[in-house]
Amino acid sequence: MSYPAGTISANGVSVPIFVSDQGRWEAEYAGRSLGFETRDKLETAIKRLTKTTTVPVAVAFVRIEKRGTAGIAKTAGTATGIHAGNGNVLVVWHQRHGDVKDQIKSPSYQTVDFGGVDDDVLAEYGDLVAAAARAEKAADEFRAKYKIDLKDEVLNAIKKATEEGQSA
């Protein structure tokens, strides 16, 4: 049996640790089970396992945000790595007033990331987004014009039939 014995923090990651009935120090990290005779040896192993390998990367991309019938807004960026603690993508946004470092999560419903596309492709995507927004607006207007509340319609019909039956 193992008992909670705190956490070991290393390289921006906190790993829960346990000690067994036999005095063995244990932890699980990244799908691996670790076990050592001393806490120091376990801590050394966790530090080694969580150590972030530093490799310079630069992945160019364009983040597109849908703006309804207005089309899209685009922001150019360069992904430079993955945050060791929270797993977010580290980026540098290229803006008019200079580069801004940031962290981003996965794209949301309103955003999409493109890589290796030119302005013509982005313009075509913007046209498609705007056309889809216009079509959705037209569908909403159509629904508003013709939809009914079926329960209300049935209740009104019952009321009318009841009133006609009483007057006969």
Image (spheres, grey):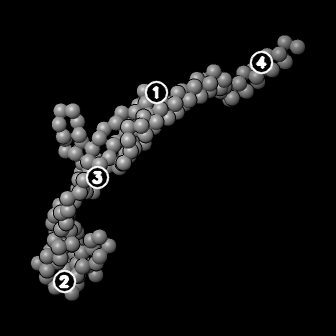
Residue on which disc 2 sits: 36
In 3D space, how far apart are the residues under numbered discs 1 and 3 (Cα atoms)?
Answer: 30 Å
Circle 4 SS class: helix
132 over 165 or under it: above or below: below
> Which one is earlier in the sequence, the residue at label 1 or at label 2?
2
Circles 1 and 3: CB distance less than 8 Å?
A: no
Dot label at residue 59? 3
Q: Which amino acid does label 1 sit on?
A: Thr
Q: Which amino acid does label 2 sit on?
A: Phe
Query: In front of the other: label 3 or label 4?
Result: 3
Comparing labels 1 and 3, the label whose residue is closer to the camera: 3
Query: Could you tell me which quadrant the N terminus lies in?
Result: bottom left
The residue positioned 29% from the left and 41% from the top of the image is: 76
Residue at 19% in and 83% down: 36
Q: Taking 26 as reference, is 66 left or right? A: right
- Residue under the image location 43 percent in, 30 percent down: 71
**Which is more N-terminal, label 3 or label 1?**
3
